[in-house]
Image (spheres, rainbow, N blue to C red):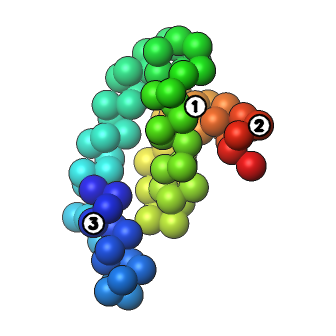
Amino acid sequence: SIVHCVVKKFFKSQEITEEDRKPIYKNLERIETYLGDKEYLIGEFSMADCIFMPIVPSLQVFGCHGYIDKSLKLQGYSERLKHRPGFK
């Protein structure tokens, strides 16, 4: 999980492994499924998307950006979140 990766990287100064990333990939698969053909998780921008917004920058820190790069759906969603006024 992301919490596990935070503890490992920032509190224990250990490298994040591919094994550590597997639960994150599983969650990204779920998000991809929830998105379907929608721009945001439930259609219009909502609290569900607000909850996910702070996670977006951490995905790169934990080396998960490659997974997002393989999914046009997640790429688009990530970019839409990054361009929201509240993201800055």
How many badges with numbers are in the image? 3
Residue placed under numbered mark 1 in the picture: 77
- Of 24 and 53, the residue lying toward us: 53
Counting residues from the start of the chain, the first of labels 1 and 3 encountered is 3
Three-letter code for the amino acid on which mark 1 is drawn = Tyr
Mark 1–mark 3 distance (CA, rounded to whole Å) = 24 Å
Three-letter code for the amino acid on which mark 3 is drawn = His
Residue placed under numbered mark 2 in the picture: 85
Q: Quadrant of residue 6?
A: bottom left
Label 2, secondary structure: give it: helix
Mark 1–mark 2 distance (CA, rounded to whole Å) = 15 Å
Label 3, secondary structure: give it: helix
Question: What residue appears at the point 50 percent right and 59 percent down from the top-left corner?
Answer: 58
Residue placed under numbered mark 3 in the picture: 4
Counting residues from the start of the chain, the first of labels 2 and 3 encountered is 3
Q: Quadrant of residue 77?
A: top right
- Does 88 sit above or below residue 14? above
Label 1, secondary structure: give it: helix
